[in-house]
Amino acid sequence: MVMTSTACGGHLQTPCWCRDTMKRFRRTPDSQRDRIKQELFQFSKTVEHGFPHQPSALGHSSSLQLLAIGTRSGAIKLYGAPGVEFMGLHDENAAVTQVHFLPHQVELVTLLDDNSLHMWTLKGHKGVSELLEIGRFVLTGPPGALPSVTRITAVLAHSSGELLLLGTEGGHVFVVEVPGFRELEERNISLEQVTSRVPDNYIGRRNLEHVEALQENPADANQVVIGYGRGVLVVWDLKKHSLLQCICPSQALESVWWTEDGGCILSSHTDGSYCRWTVGETDGNEEKSDTPYGTFPCKAISKIMQLPTAEGPPFLLFSGGMPRASYGDRHCITVIHGKSHVALDFTSRIIDFFVIREGPHHKGDPSALVVLVEEELVVIDLQAEGWPVVQTPYLVPLHSSAITCSHHVSAIPLKLWERISAAGALQSTHYSKKLWPIRGGQNLAPDPPQRDLLLTGHEDGTVRFWDASGVCLSPVYKLSTAAVFHTDADPNDNMNHSTEGEWPPFRKVGCFDPYSDDPRLGIQKIHLCKYSGYLTVAGTAGQIMVLELNDEAAEQTVEAQVVDLLQGQEGFRWKGHTQLDVREDPVQFPPGFQPFTLVQCQPPAVVTALILHSEWKLVAFGTSHGFGLFDYQQKKNVLVKCTLNPSDQLAMEGPLSRVKSIKKSLRQSFRRIRRSRVSLRKHHVNSSAKLQEANARLEAELAEMELAPVQRKIEARSSDDSFTGLVRVLYFADTFLTDSTHNTPSLWAGTNGGCVFAYILHLPTMEHRGEELITAQPAKEIQLMHRAPVVGVVVLDGHGTPLPEPLEVAHDLARSPDMHGSHHLLVVSEEQFKVFTLPKVSAKTKLKLTAIDGSRVRKVGVAWFGSNRTEDYGESGLLVLTNQGDVHAISVPHIKMQVQHPCIRREDVSGIASCVFTKHGQGFYLISPSEFERFSLSTRCLVEPRCLVEVPILKDNSNQRRPQLDGPSSAHLSTCENEDPESSARRVMEHALLNDENVLLEIQKSLEGDQMYVLENNVRNAAV
C-alpha cells in the first residue's frame, strides 16, 4: 500500500483515514495497560469484622443452627459456623426491633421500629447462599382507626411455617399468611372478642392494654397464649377460634413461657416476681408465685424460660429481677438448676438471650446459653461444671477497651505463629472446652494462602493480636503493658471474684471493660518484626517499650532510659500530662512478649511515629517535639533531634490544652460568620442579588471551617503554623547518601512542616556490635516548597522497586535490592508525590494530587498487586487514602494514577484516621467503635465469605413432621370459598408440594440450593 499526501500552503496534510489509523496505533499501549489494570486492580468491600454496633434484636433458628442480630441502623447479620456470615441492610433507616426465623425454613422476618415487616431468605446463587429481602409488609387497620391499632408489639412465627401472629398496641392479634404477607381477616383476634370473656371485676379495674407476649403451646399447635400489658393471659384456640382459658394476675406482665409438656404457663412481672399457672383450670387460680430476690422492691423480670432435663430438675432462666435499691444498675441473667444458682452479671444492657439444646430436633438437655448484650455476645456452657464461658471465634468485642491504633503484619512465619498462639492458649484456660455451639451452614471459602495478624492498641495499655487470615477475626493473644508502671489499679482486684455466701450470687461475665486505669497507658504506635520476634509499642505519655517473645515466664526489672527531645532549649514549659512511673521492683511476666527495655521521652508527649529495625537492633521514635534513635542491644541513645519551631507554643500544651485552642478557633469562626451576617443586613437587605451574594459568602466561611476542603490549589504554608515540628514518618533504608558507589544505612524522618531529615548510620561489624557504639551523622535535609506535612518516605532501588523489609532477604522471602543502578527517594506529602534522585537529591518527577481534585493524602502504604490471570506477574505500587475517603493505587517508580475508588464517607473522620493497609492490597478501617470494614484493591488477594445454607430436610416421621393446624390444615382454606377454580387448583398443588417430603427432596437435589425459591415464588404468585 502506498501512502500519499498533498501539500497545502507549504504544510504536509495527512488523509483522514491515515490520521485515524495513527490514533488507533497510539491507543494500543493504553489499551494494553487498561487490560493489565483490570488484571491487577479491583475494588471491593469484602467483610465486616468485630461486633455489630448498637445491636437491637436477636433471633435464632434451631433447625438451621444460625443466629441473627439486628441493629439500630437497620442492618441484619446472620452467623453460623466460623466463616458462615451474611449481611443485609434495610432500605429504611429504622432500627430492627425483632427477628424471627420461620420454623424449618431459610426465611426470617424482621420488624422495624417504623412498624414495617420484612421477609428475608437465603437464596442459592452460583453454589453459595445470599441473603436477600423478598417482601415488605405494613399492617393496615380499618379506615379511620388509630395508629395504635396496628402498631406491632409482639410477633409469633407459628410452627406450621405458614402463619405470623402479630400482637399490637391496641390489643388486637392479626393473623398473616407467609411468605406472601396476606392478612387472614377471618382469623384475626380482636380485643373485643377477648374482653367479652374477661371477668367484669377485672375489666372494671384496668384495661388490657397492648399485647406484650405471644407463645405457642409446644404440645398443641392450635393453642396460643396471648399476654396483655396489664397482666391478663388468654389461652386461644386457633382452630375453633375461641377462648379456652383466662388468667388474671395482679401485676403488669413482662413475658410468658409455655412449658414443653404444655401443662403450665410461666409469667414474669414488673415487680420482679414470676408465677406458674396450670393450663386447663377454669378458675385460673394462681398456683405459685415467687420473687427470687426478696421482699424489697425489685426490677422487672423481662424474660423467663424453663427447660426440662432428661434426669434431674429443669433449668429456670430469667433476666432482671434484681433488688431495685441495691442492684438496680446491674444487668443480670439468673440461672437456677437444682441447688445451683448464679446471677450472671454482664457489663452492658441485655438485649435478648436464647438457649441451645442438644439431641434430635433440639429437644434434649440445655447445652449453652447465648446472651446478646449491647457490647458483646456471651455464650455460657450449661453442661460443664461451674458454667464457664465459651470462647467466641467471631463477634469478639474489638472495643473491649477503646481502639487507639492498628498494625497489620502479612505472611507470619509458622514458627512465630505457633509461639504466639501457644502464649495465647495459656491465657484461655478459663474458657470452656466446648466447641462453638452455633454450627449452621457450610464454609466454602478456600483456606487462607498465608497467616496474617492484625494488632490493635487500646486505651488501657493492651495490645491484642487477631488472626486476620480469613473471614473470622479471631483472638490469638493479648499483651498488657500496665504491669510495667505504677497505676491506680489493684493487682489483686479480680472482677470475676465472688464472695462466699453473697446474695444475689453474682458472677461477672464478659470481657467488655471500657474503663482505663490511666489514659496515659494508651497505645499509639505498634511495630512487629515477624522475622526476629521483636515488638515495639509506644504510648500516650511518651513511653516506648521494646519486647521480645519468650516461651517461659520470667521475672525481671525494666530499666527506663530518658531522652530529652528539647535538648535543653530554654523558654519551653510542658503543660501536659506527666510521665508514667516505672516500677523499680522486678515484675513477673507470663509467657509471651516480655519488655526488656523502655525509653521515656521528655516532654512526655504522644508518640507520633515509630519504626523498628531488628537487623540493626535499632528503634526510632518521634513526637511533636522531635525524634530519636535508640540502640536496644546496648540500651543507649544514638541520636536526638529537636524539630520544635520556636513559635510553636501549642506543641507544649498537651492534648487537654489543645482542646481549649480548638474551641477558641471555633468561637472565632462563628464570630466572623455573625459579623458577616450583621454587615450584610445593613446594605440592600431586600435585594435578591445581594441576598445570594450573602449566602455565597456564608458558604465560603463555612468551607474555611471544614477540615477537608473539596477544591483548592496548593498553597504555601507558613512556617509559623502549629505543630510544624511534629514527626509524621520514620524510615530506615540502606541506600546511597554520600556518593553513587557506597551504600550506607540511613534514617529518614518527615515532619508536619514539610521537612525531611536524613542521617547516615555508622554500624560496627557483627563481631564488635556489642562493644562499639553506633553513630549518626546528618546527611541531607529537604524542605518541601509548600511545607505540606510529610506522610510517607520510600526508597526505590535500581529497578524502581521499594526496598525490602529488614531480614526479608535473609529469609529468602524477597530478592536482594538492585544496588548497581541509581536509587530514588519518593517523598509523599499530603498534597503531592515527589521523586528525587539519590545521592544528589534533585527533583525528578511529581504528581500533584491536591491540585487535581482538592484531596489530601491521609494514609499511604507500599503494596504488591498480583495478577489474577498470570501467577508470576505483579507490580509494586502505593495504596493511598485521602481525606475525601477515596482509595488510590499509584504506580512506582513512574508515579502515575492507576485506579481511584470511593471507600469511606468523607464525613467519617475517625474511619479515615483508623485505616491501615496490608502488603497485598487490602485494608481495614473502623466503621464503628467495635467493627472493622475490610476492603481490597487487589484482584488476587480477596478475603470474603463464601458459604452455603441448605433447606432443613424433614424426614417422614410423625415426630419430625412440620406441625400443622388441625381441621383446615392450610392457612389458605379460610378463604377457599372466594377463590376461582384456577386459584383453587393452584392452591391444592402448592399444598401437596409443601407437604410431600419426597417431592421436597427431589427439588432439593435438582436445584442445588435454589429449591425453596421455587416454592416461595409459587406461594407469592397465589397470594397476589
Image: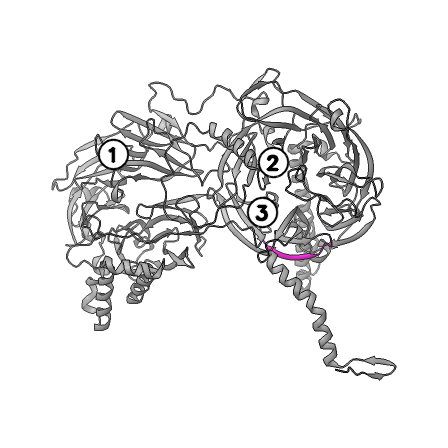
Q: Residue at x 21, y 51 (%)?
A: 963
Considering the numbered disc 3 on the image, is that residue within a helix, a strand or a loop?
Answer: strand
Question: The residue under label 2 is which amino acid type?
Answer: Lys
Q: Residues within 10 Å of mark 3 (few under 14, many from 20)?
A: many
Q: Could you tell me how far apart the alpha carbons at marks 2 and 3 are, in whole angstroms? A: 19 Å
Q: Left or right: 981 with respect to 816?
A: left
Q: Which residue is mark 2?
A: 530
Q: Residues within 10 Å of mark 2 (few under 14, many from 20)?
A: many
**Which residue is most to the top?**
585
Q: Name the image quarter holding residue 990.
A: bottom left
Considering the numbered disc 2 on the image, is that residue within a helix, a strand or a loop?
Answer: loop
Q: Which mark is residue 923?
A: 3
User: Is residue 745 part of the magenta span, yes or no?
Assistant: no
Q: Which residue is mark 1?
A: 274
Q: Position of residue 477 (x, y in %)?
A: 51, 32
Q: Could you tell me how far apart the alpha carbons at marks 1 and 2 are, in whole angstroms? A: 57 Å
Q: Could you tell me how far apart the alpha carbons at marks 3 and 1 are, in whole angstroms? A: 51 Å
- The boundaries of the magenta stretch are 893-903
Question: The residue under label 3 is which amino acid type?
Answer: Gly
Q: Left or right: 427 with respect to 149?
A: right
Q: Residue at x 80, y 52 (%)?
A: 844
Q: Position of residue 194 (x, y in %)?
A: 19, 50
First in sequence, mark 3 or 1: give its number: 1
Q: Left or right: 105 with respect to 742?
A: left
Question: The residue under label 1 is which amino acid type?
Answer: Tyr
